[in-house]
Structures are given as structure tokens and as C-alpha cells.
Image (spheres, helix red, strand yellow):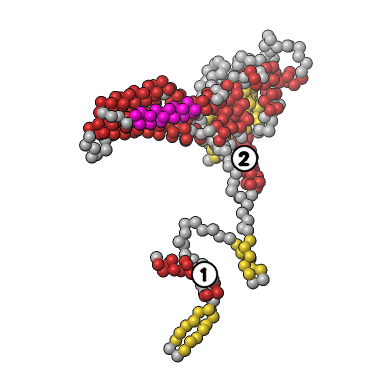
């Protein structure tokens, strides 16, 4: 170490002292000029460096410019719900903390009974407070904030639990944690100041009962957080890099039946509207390539302000996920909605999401008759040419299929494959464009 420090000190001496070195030999004195190589000594943990340029035989420091930040921008991805921590019920948290706190022993070597008892009481209260507060702090830190989530996941939270309820539950859990810490420290301090063994025991019992009462009264927030975690963790995960086909249409038009036919998804199929009460996910494997299929709740003819959360969930999928759309129509009159209302919904969705890849399908074609179905509430003398055409054959270029008779299913599968391959090319192009913009 002494050699190292002497070398370090030499670095701070004027360099002219070492420009020449004198050597003494047996026959006389000789002076030789030679360059001195200074070795770098890594004796400091942090070192500051600067660049210099040579100007007229003198070193002039130049400010070092920061390189351009070429790091990729933070990309919002989906999957935060699967990383949520496991939340224990409030009763289990308190029972586990109580068992661990009771095993805490007083500090060894305390001969005085009163001192030993107040030491034990203070340590047990402090241990109980920590065992209760640490899990709650972990929940607060590991549950993501909505602003950092993907827009699709933010919509899922809002539509599933209501606006602001997610944040409100986290705030209640944090308030419970702070209260436990405050009360625990207060009673531990009182127990440590006890003057007798009996007083220390009373302070300990009082502190334990107070913490138990707090957890019993306000522990519902933890159980609410447990419900939120279970619900979010059970939601299907959408891969943004995998082409996705989204089935859209009015309620009870046959979307779920097509999902069961096209993919591995097994949604419930019933003859009543709003059978699908959430986003259901299935997968397709074609030519060793994997694709996603989503079944969405049906849409009704009304403005966005009047839509229920199920309908808003469908719109959230179309708004925030890069999906291709398979729009399903039912002109047989079996779905409970008139073709005129379906036409109005179709026009609205096609105008709002016209930038998506699109495929129209007429389901239940085995039930279609020669004359178009007209509900009693509809105007039979309507002169809207597009609507008249829609009642007869549906949108231009629509495929007619029947799940019951399997009519047009092979053609539908082929078209779906082509649509998903086009969606894959669109995803690749967007990824390349994003990389070019970042570079």
C-alpha cells in the first residue's frame, strides 16, 4: 500500500521533475532523456475524466459532449396483470403475523423482571407491526399504476371495476399500512416505558388488541385487493406481436359459434343476447404459424354514452389493439335485432375503424329466405338503396356461411388465413418503421 500511495502522490507533482532522469554508474554521471510511462492506478471508486486537445504545445480541456440518447423509447406492452403479487386474505395476514410475533423473546441477559417484560412486550409489538406492514407495502409497490399500463389494460380496469375504484382500493391499503405502523410504534414505545411487569403486560395486551381491531375494521381493503388481483390475473393475455382476429357484431349473431369453429377458444353458445360477458381468447395454427382470435360482446344501436360496459369493452379492443376485424351479420331475424339496426351499427363501426383489415360474414345462411326479413318496427317502404341491398345479401363481398350445415366454412378459413397473413405483414412494417424513427 505504501508503494501504491507514493506512486499516487507522484502523479500530483510537476511533470518537469520526471522529464529527465539521472543515473549514476561506477565511471561517472550520465543524464538521459526518456519518456516516462505512467501506469493507471485504480484506487478510486469513481473517477472523473475529460477530453483535451493539443493547441500550440499546450493541453486545453474541451467540454465532453453527451452522446445522443439512442435508447429505445419505452414501449407499453401487455402482460402486467400476470405479474401481480399474490395477495393473502386479511385474516391470514394477521394470524401469521401474530404467530411470528409471539415467538419473539426478550433480549438475553436482562435480570430485572420488569425490564425483561417490557423489553419482550416492546419487541413483540414491533415485530407484529412489521409483519403486518411489510406485506402491505409490497402490494402497494408491486401493483402497477394505471398511467404505466397499456391503454387496453387501463380500459379493462376501468370497465371491470369502475372509474377510480382500483386506485381507491390501493389508497385504502396504503392508509391501513400507515395506521398499523403508527399505532404499532406508539404502543411499543408505551410498553418500553412501563414501570412494572404488570404494566408492561397490560401495555402489550392493549397494543395487540388495538392492532387486531384496526385490521378487523379496515382489512376489507386487502380482501378487495385480493379480488382485483384474481380478476385481473384471469383475464386473457393478448400478444401485440401476434396477428389477432376480432369478431364483432350485434348480440346473438353467431360470433361465439364461429370462434369455436375457427380456433381453440370455447366460448359459451346460447340462444340469447349477451352470452359473451367478456373478452374470450382462442388461437389458430395454420402452416406452423400462430394467430389469436377474440370473441367480443355484442353491440347495440345507441350512442357511446348509453353503452354498457360490455359494449365499451368491445370498443376498447378495437381502439387499442392491432386487430383485423371479422364482422358478423345475421339477416335471418333469429338474433332479435332487425337488419336495419344491424346496418346502422355496421356503418358506425366501419367508419370509426375503417383503418383495420376487414372481412364481412353473413351467418346462419341456411335460415335465409328468398324475401328479406323485415321487422314490424321497420319501414317497409324505405328507399335507401344501400339498406335495401343489405337486407337481401348483406355488405358487398360478404361471405355466406352456416355453422350448422358447414356451408362456406372452408372458404371462410381460407379468407381468415389471408386476412391474418396481411395483418402480420402490417405488424412487421410498423415495427420496422418504429425502429427507423427511433434510430
Residue under the point 56% across and 35% down: 148
Query: Tag 1, which secondary structure?
Result: loop
Percent of width and height locating residue 249: 62, 23
Query: Tag 2, which secondary structure?
Result: helix
Residue under the point 26% across and 33% down: 115
Q: Is residue 131 visible?
A: no
For the record, the magenta segment spans 170-190
Picture quadrant where residue 186 is located: top left
Q: Is residue 428 above or below residue 406?
A: below
Percent of width and height locating residue 100: 31, 32
> Which residue carries the number 2 mark?
427
Residue farthest along the front direction in this orientation? 195
- Rate crowding at label 2 as few (under 14), some (14 to 19) or many (20 or more) other CA atoms within 10 Å: some
Picture quadrant where residue 215 is located: top left
Q: Is residue 372 visible?
A: yes
Q: Which numbered marker is on residue 13?
A: 1
- Quick one: 365 or 84, which is closer to the camera? 84
Picture quadrant where residue 182 is located: top left
Chief secondary structure of the magenta span? Answer: helix
Left or right: residue 199 versus residue 86 is left
Amino acid at each position: 500500500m505504501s508503494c501504491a500511495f507514493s506512486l499516487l502522490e507522484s502523479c500530483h507533482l510537476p511533470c518537469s521533475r520526471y522529464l529527465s532522469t539521472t543515473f549514476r554508474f561506477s565511471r561517472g554521471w550520465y543524464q538521459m532523456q526518456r519518456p516516462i510511462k505512467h501506469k493507471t492506478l485504480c484506487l478510486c471508486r469513481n473517477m472523473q475524466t475529460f477530453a483535451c486537445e493539443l493547441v500550440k504545445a499546450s493541453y486545453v480541456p474541451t467540454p465532453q459532449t453527451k452522446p445522443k440518447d439512442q435508447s429505445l423509447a419505452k414501449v407499453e406492452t401487455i402482460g402486467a396483470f400476470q405479474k401481480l403479487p399474490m395477495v393473502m386474505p386479511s385474516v391470514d395476514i394477521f394470524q401469521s403475523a401474530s404467530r411470528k410475533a409471539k415467538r419473539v423473546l426478550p433480549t438475553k441477559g436482562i435480570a430485572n423482571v420488569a425490564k425483561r417484560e417490557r423489553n419482550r412486550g416492546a419487541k413483540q409489538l414491533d415485530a407484529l407491526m412489521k409483519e403486518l406492514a411489510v406485506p402491505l407495502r409490497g402490494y402497494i409497490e408491486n401493483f402497477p399504476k394505471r398511467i404505466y399500463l397499456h391503454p387496453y389494460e387501463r380500459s379493462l380496469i376501468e370497465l371491470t371495476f369502475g372509474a377510480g375504484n382500483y386506485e381507491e382500493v390501493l389508497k385504502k391499503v396504503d392508509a391501513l399500512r400507515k395506521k398499523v405502523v403508527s399505532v404499532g410504534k406508539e404502543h411499543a414505545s408505551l410498553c418500553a416505558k412501563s414501570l412494572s411487569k404488570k404494566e408492561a403486560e397490560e401495555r402489550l395486551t392493549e397494543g395487540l388488541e388495538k392492532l387486531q381491531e384496526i385490521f378487523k375494521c379496515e382489512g376489507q381493503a386487502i380482501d378487495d385487493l385480493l379480488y382485483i388481483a384474481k380478476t385481473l390475473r384471469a383475464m386473457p393475455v393478448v400478444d401485440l406481436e401476434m396477428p389477432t382476429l376480432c369478431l364483432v357484431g350485434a348480440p346473438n349473431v353467431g360470433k361465439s359459434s364461429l370462434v369455436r369453429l375457427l380456433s381453440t377458444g370455447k366460448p359459451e353458445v346460447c340462444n340469447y343476447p349477451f352470452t359473451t360477458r367478456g373478452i374470450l381468447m382462442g388461437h389458430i395454427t395454420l402452416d406452423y404459424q400462430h394467430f389469436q382470435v377474440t370473441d367480443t360482446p355484442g353491440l347495440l344501436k345507441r350512442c357511446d354514452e348509453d353503452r354498457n360496459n360490455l359494449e365499451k369493452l368491445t370498443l376498447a379492443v378495437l381502439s387499442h389493439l392491432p386487430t383485423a376485424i371479422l364482422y358478423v351479420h345475421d339477416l335471418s331475424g333469429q338474433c332479435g335485432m332487425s337488419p336495419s339496426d344491424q346496418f346502422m351499427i355496421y356503418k358506425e363501426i366501419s367508419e370509426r375503424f375503417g383503418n383495420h383489415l376487414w372481412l364481412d360474414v353473413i351467418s346462419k345462411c341456411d335460415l335465409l329466405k328468398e324475401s328479406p326479413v323485415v321487422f314490424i318496427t321497420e319501414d317497409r317502404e324505405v328507399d335507401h338503396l344501400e339498406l335495401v341491398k343489405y337486407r337481401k345479401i348483406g355488405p358487398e363481398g360478404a361471405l355466406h356461411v352456416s355453422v350448422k350445415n358447414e356451408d362456406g366454412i372452408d372458404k371462410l378459413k381460407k379468407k381468415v388465413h389471408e386476412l391474418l397473413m396481411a395483418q402480420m405483414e402490417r405488424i412487421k412494417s410498423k415495427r420496422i418503421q418504429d425502429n427507423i424513427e427511433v434510430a
